[in-house]
Amino acid sequence: MKFQAEDQGLHSKQNHSIKFIHASDIHLGCTQYQNEDRADDFINAFKQVLYLGIKNSVDFIILAGDVFTSIDILPEKLLQIIRLIEKFHAKTNKTIPIIAIEGNHDLRRYSHGLKTERKQSWLSVMNHLGLIILLGVGEYGESKQQLEFQEYNHKSKRGNLMKIKFANIFGTSYKGEKPESHIRTLYKSIDKKADEFNILIQHFGIEGQMKNVPGLNLYVVNKLKNKVDYLALGHFHLQYTIGGWIYNPGSTEAACSVDSLFNRGVFLVEVFKNFDEISKRVKSIKLLNRKIIWKEICLPFQFKQRNKFFEYLLSQLTQYLKDVRKELQPTIYQLPLLYLKIIGLKPVKTCKITKKDIKKLICNNFSILDARVYFEYNRSSKSIVQYL
């Protein structure tokens, strides 16, 4: 995918409409399963987000936290990301700002066992370099108690409010999984005018949207409804919308195995102003991600010979993976990642079958980027979803 120069010039300068991309949980720097091609997948997903911004002539791009997976990232990958953003700004003549907040992953406290301050993040570096606009820097007054929304200053690189056309874009850094007191503070600090569109960028999940995952009670969040027109969330990796004003796009790439089962992507949002009447249209866009395959194989009897076990495994996978083209290269998205669950009767101990052995067997015989193996011996065949 290339940024095409001819896509420029389409950026709308009219003040009666706004268009933006809302993405979150990009997890740049994630070297999933120590696989470099998977690390590139996360960068390629981010590249698609930027490309969609150009293609759709947006006014700005919102990144609602967890842009980086941690403060640990290989220099080569960081440089690749910096050059990608620089190229984006060059192609758009810096007419499409990238507006971000820090999520919990951006602010992870440990680097190679060393405890660091929460204030450190790669987003703050990007902000200092002028590549992005990081909201939330210097968000509290001297008392550290009253939240003060101040318009972002491009010289000092500080602020937590951006004004673009008739939109007010508020943002603060990560405040925890259940920031109830923070919500009350936001309510007191945000001003609402009838002829303006308020966007609030936050990084937390809504309770009940993901099973057994902590989130903030919707009743608490609803207090913001008469102050905020569009609550741009991040944190949960599945996509959901609530009440026509709360939006969570989900992760741009599958950061863990269960993510592959979620509806995920980005939101393209168009806001229209007709005198004092404001309306919006929100479209979900699915990104092109690497194919992820789930396969469950049931062992019908207890294998006593190692080679017989592998023969059976190959026979089961050969039919299932027959459509995987042999000539595909790791950089091509069609080369899939396989999650294999083995159930049924456990082979005898003398077979000495390990996950590493099975992974090597699969990768040597099929065009698979990587294989992750899970044992659930002595269980009958069930839907994979029941194990997640």
Image (spheres, rainbow, N blue to C red):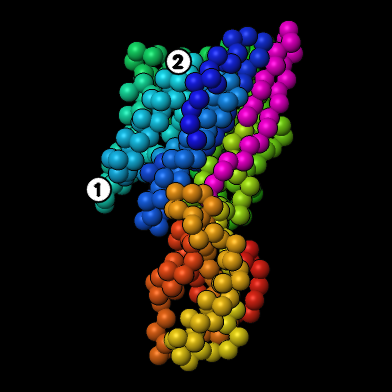
Q: Quadrant of residue 370?
A: bottom left
Along the line of sight, which residue is nearer the eye, 16 or 83? 83
Mark 1 crowd level (few <14, some 14–19, many ≥20, 10 Å Cα): few
Can I make out residue 299 in this image?
Answer: yes
Label 1: which secondary element: strand
Tell whether position 132 is magenta.
no
Q: Position of residue 310 (x, y in %)?
A: 48, 81
Image location (x, y in percent) of residue 223 = 64, 30
Of residues 167 and 191, the one drawn nearer to the viewer in this rendering: 167
Rendered-image quadrant of the C terminus: bottom right
Residue stretch in magenta:
268-290
Residue ID at (58%, 20%)? 57
Query: Residue 373 location, x and y as percent?
Result: 48, 69
Q: Amino acid at mark 1?
A: Leu
Q: Is residue 261 above or below residue 99?
A: below
Q: What is the C-alpha distance between the residues marked 2 and 1?
A: 40 Å
Q: Which residue is mark 2?
A: 93
Say which mark, if any, is on residue 285: none
Q: Secondary structure at mark 2?
A: loop
| Residue drawn at 60 percent across, 79 percent down | 298
Q: Amino acid at mark 2?
A: Asn
Residue 94 vs residue 142, the one in the foreground:
94
Residue appearing at x 26%, y 52% in the figure: 113
Q: Is residue 20 visible?
A: no
Is 342 placed above or below 158 here?
Answer: below
The residue mark sitting in front, 2 or 1, is 2
Q: Residues within 10 Å of mark 2 (few under 14, many from 20)?
A: few
Disc number placed over residue 114 in the picture, else none: 1
Dot 2 or dot 1, earlier in sequence: 2
- In terms of secondary structure, what is the magenta stretch mainly? strand
Q: Position of residue 361 (x, y in %)?
A: 43, 73
